[in-house]
Image (cartoon, helix red, strand yellow):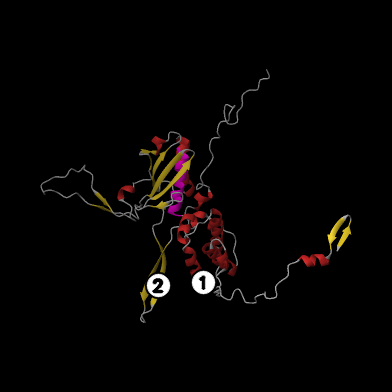
Amino acid sequence: MFVLLRGRTLPTSAAVSARLPVRLASTQMTTSNPFANLDIRPVKRPDTAAYFTRKPKFYDLLSAISNLSRQHPLPRFNEANYKRGKWIPRAELQTKLDIKISPREHELLIRRLGDVSNLRIADPAERETVTLYLNQFRRGYVHAETVTKDENGETKVLDHKVGGKKKNNGRRGFLDHLGRWHAFGRRKEATAFAWVVPVETPETTEQVTEQAPRVSDDLELDPELPIVESVKIVDNVPAHAHLPMGDVIVNGKPLAEYFFHGTDRDSVLFPFQVANKVGQYNVFLRVSGGGRTGQAEACQLAVARALYMSDRKAHVPVREAGLLRTDGRAVERKKTGKPKARKSYTWVKR
């Protein structure tokens, strides 16, 4: 009944089978389906594959924008369309979609929007549809439609336009409510604000000379009294802004009184010399911070920006001369153990 194997005694198969419990004949295996009583219904298939992602709304939006770029060939790369300031901010997008979006996901969305905005679409109707679709992702965009009804009573959309208040950009320059071209510039620690107004010429100015009304006919007028002139407002610009000659006022003082050095005065007037417009504009400047040289160069940048925005085509030399770029150079900081940034003390051996 037992087998010896290397000094060990093992039971045989007959002995093992004798020890196993005997199954009763009355006991039988049930063959019924255990899932018969469960309520199993067919699961509805998700609409999109983004259902299985963590943020279905965001990835559905990203997929729709990517499909537009696949339908049309991509043109030459244009970096201006990929700037963050052009598209909707991340906080506003999170509010619209009601989900949390990481900075990396927001940057990925901006890249896709930039690709679609570069597309060259031949069909005008499709191009307009894509443009209206992209406009809802632009910063500060407000959609408005002019809806009317035709003869059959059907509604018809006549116009799509962008509304809302447009933010003025002082870096590029803009036209304020008084008709003055306004811009600002920086250099080192100085900041300057410039208002540029064109000087009225005899062709554009309508002046009507008339005498002051008399109190009585017996009153004699003094011939030395000045004659009152009434100046008509041209292009929504007040009459007092149009001085008889191109003056430059800096912090309420003439240019020659505020800037003593000729090089500083030349820096302020350099944009007019490049554009060949000397004496054709009145300039009002407000500058603060820094020294006189830094203030002069800050005024130069502000004047150049305002002058260029007043007429871009005529003032192309201002842009080509590089006067619209901020000079970011500054004094290098002093280093420890040295009298200045780079200068060192005289080395002594002993």
Badge 2 marks a residue whose secondary structure is strand
Q: In the rendered image of this protein, does residue 140 appear above or below residue 275? A: below
Q: Which mark is residue 126?
A: 1
Q: Is residue 233 left or right of residue 47?
A: left
Q: Which residue is painted at 43% across and 42% down in the image? A: 192
**Residue 272 appears in the picture as rendered:** no
Direction from residue 348 to residue 310 in the image, left or right: left
Type of the residue with mark 1: Glu
Crowding near the residue tagged with mark 2, few <14, some 14–19, many ≥20 C-alpha atoms within 10 Å: few
Residue furthest to the bottom in view is: 152
Looking at the rendering, the stretch of residues picked out in magenta corresponds to 295-311
Residue tagged by mark 2?
158
- Tag 2 or tag 1, which sits nearer the N-term? 1
SS class of the residue under badge 1? helix
Q: Residue at x 77, y 65 (%)?
A: 19
118, 316: nearer the viewer = 118
Q: Nearer the viewer, residue 248 or 119?
A: 119
Question: Front-most of 61 and 292?
Answer: 61
The residue at 46%/63% (across/down) is: 136
Q: Any magenta on residue 339?
A: no
Task: Identify residue type, mark 2.
Answer: Leu
Is the magenta region chiefly helix, strand or loop?
helix
Task: Inspect this view and state whether residue 296 appears.
Answer: yes
Q: Is the residue 48 above or below the residue 276 in the image?
A: below
Q: What quarter of the picture does the C terminus occupy?
A: top right
